[in-house]
Amino acid sequence: YEVVYKFLMTLTFEKIKTTKIIKKFFEMLGYYTESKSLFEFTKYCHKTTKKPRNYESNFQY
């Protein structure tokens, strides 16, 4: 939990926009950050067998 806490405490909006952070966010918490780029979201999600918990809600755009 300490690693997750430190990750979240240092998270900034600029960091969220990077692919590296999005992947780390997904790996640590099971959520893919909400994305306006539906293509990028689906492309990333279909590379893995584990779907994010918010998979359906990301299709709101």
Image: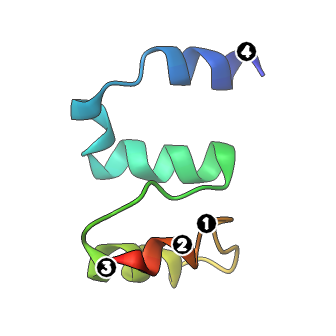
Instruction: Give the amino acid at mark 2.
Output: Ser
Mark 4: secondary structure: helix
Residue 2 — which label?
Answer: 4
Answer above or below: position of 9 versus 48: above
Instruction: Give the amino acid at mark 3.
Output: Leu
Instruction: Give the amino acid at mark 1.
Output: Asn
**In the displayed structure image, the side of residue 10 where residue 37 appears, left or right:** left
Answer above or below: position of 9 versus 51: above
Q: Outermost residue, front direction?
A: 60
**Residue drawn at 44 percent across, 80 percent down:** 59
- Which of 37 and 4 lies nearest the eye of the viewer? 37
For the residues labelled 2 and 1, the Cα–Cα distance comes to 5 Å
Local crowd size for mark 4, using a 10 Å CA cut-off: few (<14), some (14–19), many (≥20): few
- Which of 46 and 55 lies nearest the eye of the viewer? 55
**In the displayed structure image, the side of residue 24 where residue 60 appears, left or right:** left
List the residue tagged with mark 1: 54
Viewer-side label of 4, 2: 2
For the residues labelled 4 and 2, the Cα–Cα distance comes to 28 Å
Local crowd size for mark 3, using a 10 Å CA cut-off: few (<14), some (14–19), many (≥20): some
Instruction: Give the amino acid at mark 4.
Output: Glu
List the residue tagged with mark 2: 57
**Residue drawn at 41 percent across, 77 percent down:** 60
Mark 3: secondary structure: helix
**Residue drawn at 64 percent across, 18 percent down:** 5
